[in-house]
Image: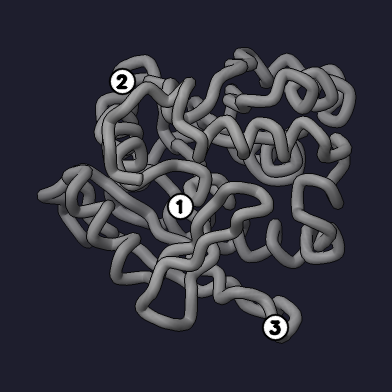
């Protein structure tokens, strides 16, 4: 999974494309049958984002991007509440088309990028917040690092990358053969951040999820060295 081979031919990606092509474009589909956690998830994310805006060197509210956006659940219920402009990037064109209906007419939504994150390179100096949630398990370690290096270039001054991901309770990476994804332990995740030249300036646990689910944590990242105030 660490090889820099062609992403188009990498079975890790082709299997994921096939899996998601058969998933209905609904909130429940996006959340793997756990659509009932959506409101709790959004409330946790709002609290985390509001805390970032309280920083002395807080990110701006000009533009955000929803990475692995699916049908735009996070864009609609979170990002559009805080930012003047929001872009979406999603590898499944069916989901992006549904996002236009799900979000509804909104002049704040500007760009819909139809590509996988292994290919996506944010325009330089563009985003105040790059939001990555429940999608990084679909990147190999190699492409994870490459993507986040590119994200660093895409940030505006004081911009942040927000990661919200499942974490394993052990120190081992868990592989899901069905949807072709991995769930990483926190140590591996932080090692990848470091390899990408990023440092975490804020972390928080998502609370009030039902028992039996993975622990979910949020990280606010900036290129290292960062001023942690």
Q: Position of residue 55 (x, y in %)?
A: 35, 55
Image: 134 above or below 175:
above
Q: Which residue is mark 2?
A: 125
- How busy is the neighbourhood of tag 3: few (under 14 within 10 Å), some, or many (20 plus)? few
Q: Which residue is mark 3?
A: 212
Residue 60 showing in the rendered view = yes
Q: Which of the image's four quarters has the N terminus?
A: top left
Foreground of the two, 67 or 20: 20
Displayed quadrant of residue 7:
top left
Whichever of labels 2 and 3 marks the residue nearer the N terminus, that label is 2
Alpha carbons under labels 3 and 1: distance apart: 21 Å
User: Of helix, strand and loop, which one carries label 2?
Assistant: loop
Q: Which of the image's four quarters has the C terminus?
A: bottom left
Name the residue: 28% across, 59% down: 200
Image: 8 above or below 58:
above
Alpha carbons under labels 2 and 3: distance apart: 40 Å
Q: Which residue is mark 1?
A: 163
Alpha carbons under labels 2 and 1: distance apart: 19 Å
- Labelled pair 3, 1 in contact (Cβ < 8 Å): no
Whichever of labels 2 and 1 marks the residue nearer the N terminus, that label is 2
Image: 221 above or below 72:
below
User: Of helix, strand and loop, which one carries label 1?
Assistant: strand
- How busy is the neighbourhood of tag 2: few (under 14 within 10 Å), some, or many (20 plus)? some
């Amino acid at each position: 999974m660490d090889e820099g081979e062609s992403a188009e031919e990498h079975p890790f990606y082709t299997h994921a494309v096939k899996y998601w092509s058969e998933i209905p474009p609904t909130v429940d589909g996006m959340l793997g049958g756990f659509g009932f956690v959506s409101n709790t998830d959004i409330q946790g994310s709002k609290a985390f984002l509001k805390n970032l805006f309280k920083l002395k060197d807080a990110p701006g509210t000009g533009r955000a991007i929803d990475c692995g956006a699916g049908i735009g659940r996070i864009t609609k219920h979170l990002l559009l509440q805080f930012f003047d402009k929001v872009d979406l990037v999603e590898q499944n064109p069916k989901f992006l088309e549904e996002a236009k209906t799900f979000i509804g007419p909104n002049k704040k939504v500007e760009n819909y990028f139809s590509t996988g994150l292994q290919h996506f390179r944010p325009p330089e100096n563009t985003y105040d917040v790059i939001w990555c949630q429940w999608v990084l398990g679909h990147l190999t370690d190699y492409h994870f690092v490459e993507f986040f290096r590119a994200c660093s270039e895409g940030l505006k001054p004081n911009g942040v990358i927000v990661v919200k991901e499942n974490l394993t309770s052990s120190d081992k990476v868990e592989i899901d053969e069905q949807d072709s994804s991995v769930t990483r332990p926190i140590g591996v995740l932080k090692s990848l951040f470091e390899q990408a030249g990023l440092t975490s300036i804020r972390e928080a646990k998502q609370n009030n999820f039902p028992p039996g689910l993975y622990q979910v944590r949020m990280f606010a990242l900036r290129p290292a060295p960062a001023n942690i105030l």
